[in-house]
Amino acid sequence: MAELPSGFAAIILVGGKARRFAGCAKSELVVGGATILERMLSACEGAAARVVVGSRPSASAALPGGVTGLVEDPPGSGPAHAVAAGLRVVPEDCTRVAILGGDLPFLTLEALQLLIANSEPENTGAVYGDDAGRKQWLCGLWPASRVRQNAAAVSPGAPAKSLFAGIEVNVVPWNAASPPPWFDCDTPADLDQARTWATDT
C-alpha cells in the first residue's frame, strides 16, 4: 500500500456548530459503517502527525493511539483559531500540513496523495475545487511554515481563508469515478447522499 511522505501532518477540525443537524457533531455521523472522523483518520494514517481540534461529544469513542486531540481556547472560536491551536502540537519538522474540515467522509489516501503531487513548488498550497471550480479551503494541503506565520496573527472568529494569505495555491479537480474527497456533509440531504454513495461503492 502506498504511503504518505514523511514531514506531512493533518489537522482535522471537528468543533463546528452543525446547526442543520440540531447540534449533532458532524464528525460523529456514521457513513458506511464508520464515523466520518474514523474514516478521515484512516485516510491520514500514514501522516507523521494527526491532530483533531474541537469539542467532541462525551459519548464519542476514544481517539486512536498516536492521534492528538485538543480544544482551542476559547472553544468554538472559529476554524482559523482552531488551526492555530493545532499547529502548536505539530512537530516543527513537518513541512506540509493538511487542513481538513471534520465532515469529509470520502477523504482517502489517494486523495491526499493527489494534493501532495500538486503542492509543488515547496511553498505552494493545493486545494480541491468542487464541480463548479470553487476552492474548498478546508480540503487542502499547505506549506506548514507559511501557515504558521499567518496563524500567529489570527484572532478568535477569523475565517479559515485568513490562514492562507499570500500563499500561491493550485486548485485540484477530482476526476475519478469515486465520490469526491471535498464532499462535505453540511445538511441532512448531504448525509443521505453520502450514505447512498458509501453503499454503492
Image (cartoon, rainbow, N blue to C red):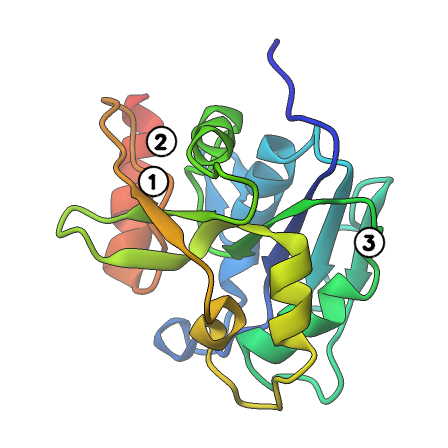
Nearer-the-camera pick, 109 or 119: 119
Nearer-the-camera pick, 4 or 195: 4
Q: Disc 3 and disc 1: Cα gap in Å?
A: 28 Å
Whether 116 is drawn above or below 140: the answer is above
Q: Name the residue under label 1.
A: 195
Q: What element carries label 2?
A: helix
> Residue at horizontal 30%, vertical 64%?
187
- Label for residue 186? none
> Residue at horizontal 34%, vertical 64%?
186
Residue kind at label 2, given as amino acid type = Ala
Q: What element carries label 1?
A: helix
Q: Disc 3 and disc 2: Cα gap in Å?
A: 27 Å
Quarter the N terminus occupies:
top right
> Residue at horizontal 59%, vertical 51%?
143
Task: Return the x and y of residue 132 as percentages of the image width and height.
Answer: 13, 52
> Which of the marked residues, 3 or 1, is nearer the chain's N terminus?
3
Task: Return the x and y of residue 106 as percentages of the image width and height.
Answer: 41, 37
Q: Disc 2 and disc 1: Cα gap in Å?
A: 5 Å
Whether 7 is drawn above or below 1: the answer is below
Q: Mark 2 points at which residue?
A: 198
Q: Which of marks 3 and 1 is in front?
A: 3
Q: Mark 3 points at which residue?
A: 68
How crowded pointer 2 is (Cα within 10 Å; few <14, some 14-19, many 20+) is rated as: some
Whether 102 is drawn above or below 197: the answer is below
Task: Return the x and y of residue 192 as percentages of the image width and height.
Answer: 28, 49
Question: Could you tell whether 55 is left or right of 23 in the image?
Answer: right
